[in-house]
Image (cartoon, grey):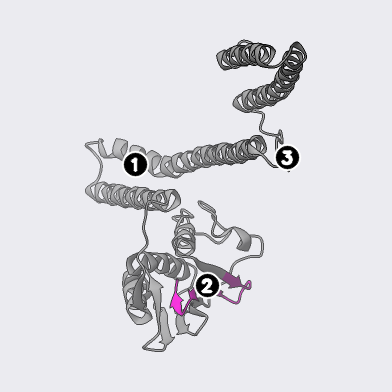
Amino acid sequence: MWRNREIKLFFIVIGIVTMAGTAAAGFLLSIQAAGMVFMTSLLLALCSVFFTRWRYREIEKLSGYLRKISSGDVSLDLRDNHEGELSILKNDIYKVTLMLSESRSQLERDKLTLTDALSDISHQLKTPLTSMTVMADLLSDSSLEESKRAEFTGNIRVQLERIEWLVSSLLKLSKIDAGTIAFKKDRVPLRDLIDRAVQPVLIPMDIKEQTLIVNGAEDAAFTGDLRWTAEALINILKNCVEHTGDGGTISISYEENPLFTEISIADDGPGISKEDLPYIFRRFYKGKNAGDDSVGIGLAMAHSIITGQHGDLEVRSEKGDGTAFSIKFYKRNGQSE
């Protein structure tokens, strides 16, 4: 405490005031009055020393607390329920400590997520890159038949398209996870959304001779982002087409009520096993019935897009009885979110 300049200056001023008061009392009144003034000033100075020392001890405790925080120990609790500026300071420091602890935990989680994502990406890219390397070596053989050369060239093109789709999807997911995408909040007719979403799957459905059934009120709508929500629906529809056999049926129904807007997409495929059902929205997860070309990213992207707009995406499925996806956008103050 005594090494602080302001303490030294304070007691110098107190000493000067005490001596001046004592001298004035002795000169104007009496020796007894001077003694009384001196003793009173001395007691006040001692009280000031006591309380100042106590405050500096508390400040020293705070310094020690902050040193422990900087070394990584965030388990200490400094709060107290007393009044005063020092107690307010303690509580504020504790709040900042909690914020720093949460930020550190979030950074650790983000680091683990990034590590897992890089591992998954490298795994997903390894197979097509290995396949293209082998086919490129075969294409370098001048004696290779033209039919085989065309076959290998076509396979390389397919693998390149797969890599392009994977990279594009991962970039979109990264933007969603980072919160850099500002979803629009337009009033979107559901019929326009459905028309936009089904276009990319019409040809695959035609090849598999599948039937598409769409039911819903013409005036039904929701408030959200048309382009991104259509992207989510496209990935769900692609999943349904992939897991529905030739001649199967995929149905889309939608409705709007005072509480929420709901879109249901169902197929009559083999369904999803109970073991896979809790994990189908997990990134890079591939169920038992997934095709060889499945990456396990489409449903994860759909889930991120819908929940990013404060919606819910649920799935119901029974083995051998098809799968149904339910999307709900809840309303607030009479408007869809």
Determine contact: label 3, label 1, CB under 8 Å.
Answer: no
Q: Which residue is mark 2?
A: 325
Q: Which mark is nearer the camera, 3 or 1?
A: 3
User: Residue 214 occupies which quadrant of the picture?
Assistant: bottom left
Is residue 320 magenta-colored? Answer: yes
Q: Which residue is mark 1?
A: 132
Q: Is residue 231 left or right of residue 280?
A: left
Q: Is 320 situated above or below 148?
A: below
Identity of the amino acid at label 3? Asp
Identity of the amino acid at label 2? Phe
User: Residue 203 occupies which quadrant of the picture?
Assistant: bottom left
Q: Secondary structure at mark 1?
A: helix
Q: Which residue is mark 3?
A: 80
Q: Earlier in the sequence, mark 2 or mark 1?
A: 1
Q: Position of residue 20 (x, y in %)?
A: 61, 13
Identity of the amino acid at label 1? Met
Q: Which mark is nearer the camera, 2 or 1?
A: 2
Using the image as rendered, state which of residue 50 and residue 163 is in the foreground.
50
Query: Gap in Å between the C-alphas at discs 3 and 1?
Result: 66 Å
Determine contact: label 2, label 1, CB under 8 Å.
Answer: no
Instruction: Work out whether residue 336 can be spotted.
Output: yes
Task: Specify the segment rendered in magenta.
Answer: 315-337
Q: Position of residue 1 (x, y in %)?
A: 66, 15
**Could you classify mark 2 by the number of other residues whose Cα lies within 10 Å: few (under 14), some (14-19), or many (20 or more)?**
some
